[in-house]
Image (tube, grey):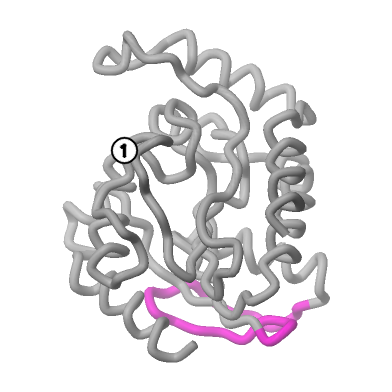
Amino acid sequence: MISNFENLKKQIINCRKCPRLIKFRKKIVKNKRKQFIDQKYWGKPITGFGDINAQILFVGLAPAAHGGTRTGRVFTGDKSSDFLYKCLHKANISNKNKSNHINDGLKLKNAFITAALKCVPPEDKPNKDEITNCSKFFQKEINLLKNLKVVVALGKIAFDTCVNFYKINYGFSEKIKFGHNLKYKLPNNITLVGCYHPSPRNVNTGRINEKKMTDLFKNILKKI
Protein backbone atom coordinates (compact mmCIF):
# COMPACT_ATOMS: atom_id res chain seq x y z
CA MET A 1 0.00 0.00 0.00
CA ILE A 2 2.78 2.45 0.94
CA SER A 3 4.61 1.76 -2.33
CA ASN A 4 1.37 2.45 -4.25
CA PHE A 5 1.07 5.83 -2.57
CA GLU A 6 4.75 6.57 -3.19
CA ASN A 7 4.33 5.74 -6.87
CA LEU A 8 1.30 8.01 -7.06
CA LYS A 9 3.23 10.82 -5.38
CA LYS A 10 5.95 10.53 -8.03
CA GLN A 11 3.35 10.66 -10.81
CA ILE A 12 1.78 13.78 -9.33
CA ILE A 13 5.06 15.62 -8.71
CA ASN A 14 6.30 14.85 -12.23
CA CYS A 15 3.06 15.87 -13.96
CA ARG A 16 3.42 18.61 -16.57
CA LYS A 17 0.06 18.42 -18.34
CA CYS A 18 -1.13 21.96 -17.64
CA PRO A 19 1.09 24.68 -19.19
CA ARG A 20 -0.89 27.53 -17.61
CA LEU A 21 -0.41 26.12 -14.11
CA ILE A 22 3.29 25.43 -14.66
CA LYS A 23 3.77 29.03 -15.78
CA PHE A 24 1.88 30.33 -12.75
CA ARG A 25 3.87 28.16 -10.34
CA LYS A 26 7.12 29.49 -11.76
CA LYS A 27 5.86 33.04 -11.35
CA ILE A 28 5.08 32.40 -7.67
CA VAL A 29 8.54 30.92 -7.05
CA LYS A 30 10.15 33.94 -8.69
CA ASN A 31 7.99 36.53 -6.91
CA LYS A 32 8.22 35.36 -3.31
CA ARG A 33 6.51 37.13 -0.45
CA LYS A 34 8.86 39.31 1.58
CA GLN A 35 8.55 37.21 4.74
CA PHE A 36 9.62 34.12 2.77
CA ILE A 37 12.26 35.75 0.59
CA ASP A 38 15.09 33.57 1.99
CA GLN A 39 13.15 30.32 1.69
CA LYS A 40 13.31 27.86 -1.18
CA TYR A 41 9.84 27.35 -2.61
CA TRP A 42 8.66 23.83 -3.48
CA GLY A 43 7.12 25.06 -6.74
CA LYS A 44 5.77 21.67 -7.87
CA PRO A 45 2.43 19.84 -7.75
CA ILE A 46 1.26 18.93 -4.24
CA THR A 47 0.43 15.39 -3.16
CA GLY A 48 -2.01 14.15 -0.53
CA PHE A 49 -0.88 13.72 3.07
CA GLY A 50 -1.90 11.67 6.09
CA ASP A 51 -3.00 8.24 7.24
CA ILE A 52 -3.22 5.83 4.29
CA ASN A 53 -5.65 3.68 6.30
CA ALA A 54 -7.93 6.66 6.87
CA GLN A 55 -11.71 6.57 6.91
CA ILE A 56 -11.93 10.35 6.43
CA LEU A 57 -10.71 12.32 3.41
CA PHE A 58 -10.49 16.10 3.66
CA VAL A 59 -10.51 17.82 0.26
CA GLY A 60 -9.55 21.40 -0.55
CA LEU A 61 -9.59 22.94 -4.01
CA ALA A 62 -5.86 23.57 -4.55
CA PRO A 63 -2.63 24.39 -2.67
CA ALA A 64 -2.17 28.00 -1.58
CA ALA A 65 0.31 30.10 -3.55
CA HIS A 66 2.52 30.84 -0.53
CA GLY A 67 1.33 27.91 1.58
CA GLY A 68 1.49 24.47 -0.02
CA THR A 69 3.23 25.75 -3.15
CA ARG A 70 5.96 27.12 -0.88
CA THR A 71 6.19 24.35 1.73
CA GLY A 72 5.52 21.28 -0.41
CA ARG A 73 2.58 20.00 1.66
CA VAL A 74 -1.14 20.62 1.30
CA PHE A 75 -2.66 22.99 3.91
CA THR A 76 0.74 23.91 5.33
CA GLY A 77 2.23 27.31 6.09
CA ASP A 78 -0.73 29.67 5.64
CA LYS A 79 -3.56 31.22 7.67
CA SER A 80 -6.15 28.70 6.49
CA SER A 81 -4.00 25.81 7.67
CA ASP A 82 -3.44 27.52 11.04
CA PHE A 83 -7.17 27.55 11.70
CA LEU A 84 -7.81 24.10 10.23
CA TYR A 85 -5.20 22.40 12.39
CA LYS A 86 -6.39 24.09 15.58
CA CYS A 87 -9.70 22.34 14.93
CA LEU A 88 -8.22 19.03 13.82
CA HIS A 89 -6.08 18.95 16.95
CA LYS A 90 -9.05 19.70 19.21
CA ALA A 91 -10.94 16.88 17.50
CA ASN A 92 -7.98 14.54 18.15
CA ILE A 93 -7.39 14.00 14.42
CA SER A 94 -4.00 15.75 14.36
CA ASN A 95 -1.11 15.38 16.82
CA LYS A 96 -0.26 19.10 16.43
CA ASN A 97 -2.30 22.29 16.32
CA LYS A 98 -0.23 23.83 13.51
CA SER A 99 1.02 22.80 10.09
CA ASN A 100 4.14 24.86 9.50
CA HIS A 101 6.53 22.94 7.28
CA ILE A 102 7.01 19.50 5.77
CA ASN A 103 9.39 18.26 8.49
CA ASP A 104 7.43 19.49 11.52
CA GLY A 105 6.46 16.01 12.75
CA LEU A 106 2.79 16.48 11.96
CA LYS A 107 0.70 13.29 11.84
CA LEU A 108 -2.97 12.63 11.14
CA LYS A 109 -5.07 9.92 12.75
CA ASN A 110 -7.73 8.25 10.61
CA ALA A 111 -7.58 11.14 8.13
CA PHE A 112 -6.00 11.98 4.80
CA ILE A 113 -5.89 15.50 3.32
CA THR A 114 -5.60 16.35 -0.35
CA ALA A 115 -6.53 18.94 -2.94
CA ALA A 116 -8.74 18.23 -5.93
CA LEU A 117 -6.31 20.29 -8.02
CA LYS A 118 -2.63 19.57 -7.35
CA CYS A 119 -1.32 22.96 -8.51
CA VAL A 120 -2.39 26.46 -7.56
CA PRO A 121 -4.41 28.11 -10.39
CA PRO A 122 -4.44 31.86 -11.10
CA GLU A 123 -7.13 33.56 -8.95
CA ASP A 124 -8.02 30.10 -7.57
CA LYS A 125 -9.97 29.44 -10.76
CA PRO A 126 -8.96 26.24 -12.60
CA ASN A 127 -10.27 25.64 -16.09
CA LYS A 128 -12.11 22.51 -17.18
CA ASP A 129 -9.09 20.79 -18.75
CA GLU A 130 -7.00 21.34 -15.60
CA ILE A 131 -9.68 19.79 -13.40
CA THR A 132 -10.00 16.86 -15.83
CA ASN A 133 -6.24 16.26 -15.82
CA CYS A 134 -6.09 16.23 -12.02
CA SER A 135 -9.22 14.12 -11.58
CA LYS A 136 -7.17 11.05 -12.55
CA PHE A 137 -4.92 11.59 -9.54
CA PHE A 138 -7.89 12.29 -7.30
CA GLN A 139 -9.50 9.03 -8.37
CA LYS A 140 -6.30 7.09 -7.67
CA GLU A 141 -6.14 8.58 -4.17
CA ILE A 142 -9.74 7.57 -3.50
CA ASN A 143 -9.10 4.06 -4.83
CA LEU A 144 -6.02 3.67 -2.63
CA LEU A 145 -7.89 4.75 0.50
CA LYS A 146 -9.45 1.33 1.01
CA ASN A 147 -11.17 2.22 4.31
CA LEU A 148 -12.68 5.50 3.10
CA LYS A 149 -16.13 6.30 4.46
CA VAL A 150 -16.41 10.10 4.58
CA VAL A 151 -15.28 12.89 2.24
CA VAL A 152 -15.21 16.34 3.86
CA ALA A 153 -15.23 19.11 1.26
CA LEU A 154 -13.53 22.24 2.60
CA GLY A 155 -15.42 25.02 0.83
CA LYS A 156 -18.05 25.24 -1.90
CA ILE A 157 -15.62 25.01 -4.82
CA ALA A 158 -14.09 21.81 -3.42
CA PHE A 159 -17.61 20.51 -2.76
CA ASP A 160 -18.72 21.21 -6.34
CA THR A 161 -15.53 19.63 -7.67
CA CYS A 162 -16.15 16.46 -5.63
CA VAL A 163 -19.76 16.24 -6.82
CA ASN A 164 -18.72 16.71 -10.43
CA PHE A 165 -16.02 14.07 -10.01
CA TYR A 166 -18.56 11.52 -8.77
CA LYS A 167 -20.96 12.47 -11.57
CA ILE A 168 -18.34 11.84 -14.26
CA ASN A 169 -16.69 8.76 -12.77
CA TYR A 170 -19.51 7.04 -10.89
CA GLY A 171 -22.72 8.21 -12.55
CA PHE A 172 -23.92 10.20 -9.53
CA SER A 173 -27.00 12.16 -10.60
CA GLU A 174 -28.60 13.58 -7.46
CA LYS A 175 -28.92 17.38 -7.30
CA ILE A 176 -27.35 18.55 -4.06
CA LYS A 177 -26.27 21.91 -2.65
CA PHE A 178 -23.36 23.00 -0.51
CA GLY A 179 -23.89 23.90 3.13
CA HIS A 180 -21.92 23.55 6.34
CA ASN A 181 -22.58 20.16 7.94
CA LEU A 182 -24.92 19.07 5.15
CA LYS A 183 -24.43 15.37 4.38
CA TYR A 184 -25.14 13.33 1.25
CA LYS A 185 -24.67 9.72 0.22
CA LEU A 186 -22.34 9.16 -2.73
CA PRO A 187 -21.69 5.95 -4.69
CA ASN A 188 -19.68 3.18 -2.96
CA ASN A 189 -21.37 4.05 0.34
CA ILE A 190 -19.34 7.24 0.77
CA THR A 191 -20.78 10.16 2.75
CA LEU A 192 -20.01 13.67 1.45
CA VAL A 193 -19.97 16.39 4.12
CA GLY A 194 -19.93 20.10 3.33
CA CYS A 195 -17.71 22.30 5.50
CA TYR A 196 -16.98 26.01 5.29
CA HIS A 197 -13.45 26.67 4.12
CA PRO A 198 -11.05 27.61 6.97
CA SER A 199 -10.08 30.83 5.21
CA PRO A 200 -9.33 34.08 7.07
CA ARG A 201 -12.32 35.66 5.31
CA ASN A 202 -14.74 33.06 6.68
CA VAL A 203 -13.17 33.21 10.14
CA ASN A 204 -13.09 37.03 10.32
CA THR A 205 -16.70 37.38 9.19
CA GLY A 206 -17.86 34.81 11.73
CA ARG A 207 -19.16 32.38 9.15
CA ILE A 208 -17.00 29.71 10.77
CA ASN A 209 -15.41 29.48 14.21
CA GLU A 210 -13.33 26.91 16.07
CA LYS A 211 -16.28 25.40 17.92
CA LYS A 212 -18.43 25.01 14.82
CA MET A 213 -15.68 23.33 12.81
CA THR A 214 -14.37 21.20 15.69
CA ASP A 215 -17.90 19.99 16.48
CA LEU A 216 -18.36 18.94 12.86
CA PHE A 217 -15.12 16.92 12.95
CA LYS A 218 -16.00 15.30 16.29
CA ASN A 219 -19.46 14.32 15.04
CA ILE A 220 -17.97 12.69 11.96
CA LEU A 221 -15.65 10.63 14.17
CA LYS A 222 -18.56 9.47 16.32
CA LYS A 223 -20.51 8.17 13.34
CA ILE A 224 -17.85 6.20 11.47
Residue located at (56% from left, 40% from top): 125
Answer whether residue 212 is magenta in the image.
no
Residue nearest the viewer, comparing 100 with 155? 100
Residue located at (40% from left, 69% from top): 195
Q: Is residue 63 above or below residue 169?
A: above
**Residue indicated by mark 1:** 100
Q: Is residue 94 above or below residue 167?
A: above
Q: Bounds of the magenta span?
A: 172-189
- 116 left or right, relative to 68: right
Residue nearest the viewer, comparing 31 with 5? 5
* Relative image position of residue 201 (x, y in whole percent): 26, 49
Q: Which class describes the residues within 10 Å of circle 1: few (<14), some (14-19), or many (20+)? A: some
At numbered mark 1, what does the secondary structure look like: helix, strand or loop? Answer: loop
In this rendering, does residue 128 appear at all? no
In this rendering, does residue 180 appear at all? yes
Residue nearest the viewer, comparing 93 with 123? 93
Residue nearest the viewer, comparing 204 with 68? 68
Q: Main secondary structure of the magenta part?
A: loop
* Relative image position of residue 54 (x, y in whole percent): 55, 70
Q: Is residue 49 above or below residue 88?
A: above
